[in-house]
Image (cartoon, rainbow, N blue to C red):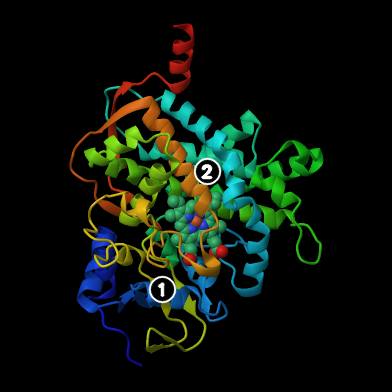
Amino acid sequence: MSLPPGPRLPRLAQAAVVTAAPYAWMAKRRERYGDVFSSHFPFFGRVVYVADPALVKEVFTGDPQTFHAGEANATVLGDALGDNSLLTLDEGRHMSQRKLLLPPFHGGAVRRYAEVMADATEREVAGWPVGRAFALRPHMQAITLEVILRAVFGVRDGARMDLFRERIPRLGNLSSVLDWLPVMQRDLGGLTPAARFRKAVAAVDELIYAEIAERRAIGDAADRDDVLTLLLSARHEDGSPMSDIELRDELMTLLTAGHETTATGLSWAFERLLRTPAVMERTLDSLDDDDYLDAVVKETLRLRPVIVDVARKLTRETEVAGWTLPAGTLVLPAIAAIHMRPDLYPSPKEFRPERFLSEGAESYAWIPFGGGVRRCIGASFAQVEMRIVLREVLRRVRLRADSQRPERPQIRHVTVVPARGCRVVVEERLASPREAERLATVG
Ligand code: HEM
């Protein structure tokens, strides 16, 4: 069976090129081979990319029984998420979990978390050093972790919060591309990364189950609006509540999908703003303007998409983009290539939030959150959080990049991060808005 055109490099060499320059690799493949191209990778085998909005629509709206996202995600995300994870399920079971999880993540619903997001940012920024270069990304991770723990898990107990903060980063530090090697999946007396990873997962599970048990026992739903509270009262179609295991799997899924991704998106927003003075200036003048900040967020996710592609695994022989592809093929909307098309985004390499002010992006042309029945359920949550964190940081500190050289995009597990973690220097602290208000009243 013939496949769309693509590079002939050996699999490992291709994987190395993608890892070293993920955005450029994908955009160049499209320039060279057109809107449909194929590739071969270790572990994943044959994959076919589509890089045209109409073809992406075909994939995103394809029959979920044929286009399996869950199966494709499970290859990369491993088994830490459990058997009920929205990310790794398909078809009927996926839809029934999705219906339970969607309501707390609707655009209107997530606005209630604005204060938690602003407070977490204020506390984090207060500890930043002045005049000394440091990587911003770990601080963005601290903020997004705190927000998930408070807004999604609803943790209030200080001691448990500290334990979560201590144990969760170990999950991220232990997962790497090497974990996909079969030998790494074995235990070998607790020595392999996989064994240590399982231990780290168990340590977080213990805290999640403790939180669930306590909340069921206290029954203080009336006084709370976090996501776990809403899930505790959600009902399956047959009227049954979610089990502890289901709740654990979905909380772990929301944590995995929502914490590093948002922190990375924020790091790229600062990385680009600090190297595009005119845009930074307009942003500083527009801190009260939600529309402009939203445009900055959208343009960041266009130019530096945190996830470069999303996958669907074909369960049967299927025609996609005019090609008959065999069962088992991974079909991937090429997010990074579409976002760099000059016909959709003139001067695509320029960071220009204004392009999102006048008109919205054509659907299926702006797809940092994927699409169809698998579209990211945290898209509104992430965009509101990015807008609030940008505003609260820029109100409090004047930043500069420690070097004007753009940071290289680098693959870290499934996300693309700025290679140096977005290194910045705080030039000065600004009077905080509350402080400024107080001074104005006193004066
Ligand atoms: C900038 C931040 C984020 C980015 C770039 C992002 C991106 C994505 C992408 C590309 C997908 C796959 C969509 C597809 O296969 O078509 C996805 C799925 C998902 N995301 Fe996000 N995400 C972000 C933040 C969040 C947040 C904050 C949460 C929740 C707290 C979240 C929860 C999920 C879940 C549960 C799924 C699986 C949906 C399903 O399969 O039905 N994400 N995300």
Indicate the secondary structure of the residue bearing disc 2: helix
Q: Is residue 49 above or below residue 152?
A: below
Residue bearing mark 1: 56
Query: Is the C-beta separation of discs 1 and 2 under 8 Å?
Result: no
Q: Nearer the viewer, residue 70 or 58?
A: 58
Q: Which residue is mark 2?
A: 168
Residue at point 22% right, 34% down? Answer: 402
User: In front: 102, or 84?
Assistant: 102
Q: Is residue 195 visible?
A: no
Residue shown at 48% from the left, 7% from the top: 442
- Residue at image position (47%, 77%) is 313
Q: Secondary structure at mark 1?
A: helix
Residue at (38% x, 48% y) in the render: 295
Q: Let me know if residue 371 appears in the view.
A: yes
168 and 391: which is toward the camera: 391
Residue found at the far top of this picture: 443
